[in-house]
Amino acid sequence: GEEVAQTPKHLVRGEGQKAKLYCAPIKGHSYVFWYQQVLKNEFKFLISFQNENVFDETGMPKERFSAKCLPNSPCSLEIQATKLEDSAVYFCASSQSSYKDNYGYTFGSGTRLTVV
Amino acid sequence: GQQVMQIPQYQHVQEGEDFTTYCNSSTTLSNIQWYKQRPGGHPVFLIQLVKSGEVKKQKRLTFQFGEAKKNSSLHITATQTTDVGTYFCAGSPTSGTYKYIFGTGTRLKVLA
């Protein structure tokens, strides 16, 4: 189907625990993006991939966040040792290769991470 | 770092009234996109603007990209209750990076 599938929908972790989020982009989309949306609606760019290669990781807090997009597997975003401020909705999006066409991101429904 | 601001932050309108949200970037953009996010939902792509001064229409929605490619606007004519949601602009600072900086969003409520 033509949707970006994110799992799980909700995730609750105790402070210091690990959290792993998954994203299956639309087949044929070359680019995958992860964004973090906090309560005030602000979207923070985390990382992007072009196929399985990291394209831009300027938004990643590298000490605790890591991400992968391996062939034939869902992409993943992992947070080691979660902190309270990591509580947010994490959106994955994918897009076709050409920004010049009228294609935007197709977002998944998000994973709501709550750190307690 | 680059910022993309939107005003107003919130807007309540009576059904049938018009609505406009404005998007301003601190730097020149390669292109700009607009998204709508319903409460509890995910952003849905509406449109992309690339050319300086470009104007595009989708039914009751009119999108503009400024001449300097640093600002944009979305205007909705005769709002309906289905227009409720938060409207985000997202600007790409550099062509080919596919990285978009999202605006702060404008939350629209439509009163029936």
Image (cartoon, grey):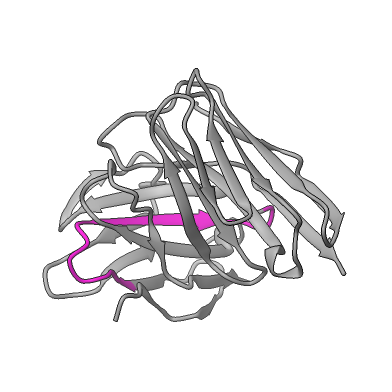
* Image spot of residue B12 (x, y percent): 85, 54
Front one among B50 and A113: B50
Which residue is drawn at the image coordinates 49% and 18% (left, top)? B68
**Is A26 colored magenta in this rendering?**
yes
Which residue is drawn at the image coordinates 48% and 70% (left, top)? A110
Q: Does residue A52 show up?
A: yes
User: As drawn, which residue projects farthest toward the top?
Assistant: B68
Drawn side of residue A88 relative to residue B50, left or right: right
Which residue is drawn at the image coordinates 35% and 72% (left, top)? A4
**Is A60 colored magenta in this rendering?**
no
Front one among A111 and B110: B110
Q: Does residue A80 show up?
A: no
Query: Looking at the image, how many numbered discs can be counted on the residues?
Result: 0
In the figure, residue B23 lies in which quadrant?
Answer: top right
* Quadrant assignment for the C terminus of chain B: bottom right
User: As drawn, which residue projects farthest toward the left?
Assistant: A71
* Image spot of residue A78 (x, y percent): 36, 65
- Above or below, B44 against A101 in this view is below
User: Which segment did they paint magenta?
Assistant: A23-40
* Image spot of residue A68 (x, y percent): 23, 61
